Image: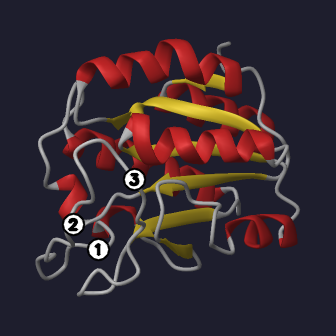
Amino acid sequence: MPVTTLDPKTALVVIDLQGGIVAAPTVPIPAAEVVARTAALAAAFRAHDLPVVLVRVSTAPDGADAVTGRIDGGPRPPRPRPEGWDELAEAITGPGDIVVTKRNWGAFHGTDLDTQLRRRGVTQIVLTGIATSIGVESTARAAHEHNYHVTLATDAMTDLDVDTHRNTIEKIFPRLGETGTTDEIIELLAKTHG
């Protein structure tokens, strides 16, 4: 369903726009465009005194706190991460932003994201980030289960695989919330919060 409204207490939640992830080859949208569109959304949210939450994924250098479990192909050994891998993209950061560090795909499990949002009276989130079918989708599902209204900025997210990106955008997101472009969301933000 196309984006129709933004609640008075809406937060922007940005998923994994950090050094090691924005450096990966992404499709169908280059990571640099996702960062630029997210930066525009973050500036608009800050201009209306609405929360901006920057979520990053990180693990201990030895991978001791990485998620384990049985998956096809067997467990993956911890990979060494290059310096700056988990540092947020500078273009999206601003004073007063909330930073949440996660260890899982989704931003709710094992973090204080829900507490941070509820303390501020947030009832709706707008999501951006990488990867559409992993961190963004997992967070959108959990937000829906936590009874937040969910809006997805579909031109401010991308993936490592075009088919999984498309499936999430076309099949999953319409069941979880409303979708719109960065420009549509910024225009609606100006109308409802201006």
87 horizontally vs 125: left or right: left
The structure residue drawn at horizontal position 23% and vertical position 28%, both measured from the top left corner, is 161
Residue hosting label 2: 19
Residue that numbered label 1 is attached to: 86
The residue shown at (50%, 65%) is 54
How many numbered discs?
A: 3
Which of pointers 3 and 2 indicates the residue nearer the eye? 3
Give percent across and percent down for residue 124.
77, 45
Count residues near mark 2 (Cα–Cα under 10 Å), then give few for <14, some for 14-19, many for 20+: some
86 vs 130: above or below: below
> Residues under labels 3 and 2: Cα distance?
28 Å
The answer to whether mark 1 and mark 2 are in CB contact below 8 A is yes
Nearest the camera: 61 or 77? 77
Q: Which residue is mark 3?
A: 70
**What amino acid type is highlighted by mark number 1?**
Asp
Q: CA distance from mark 3 to mark 1?
A: 25 Å
Looking at the rendered image, the disc whose residue lies closer to the viewer, 3 or 1, is 3
Residue 35 appears left or right of 152: left
Q: Nearer the viewer, residue 102 or 31?
A: 102
> Which label is found at residue 2?
none
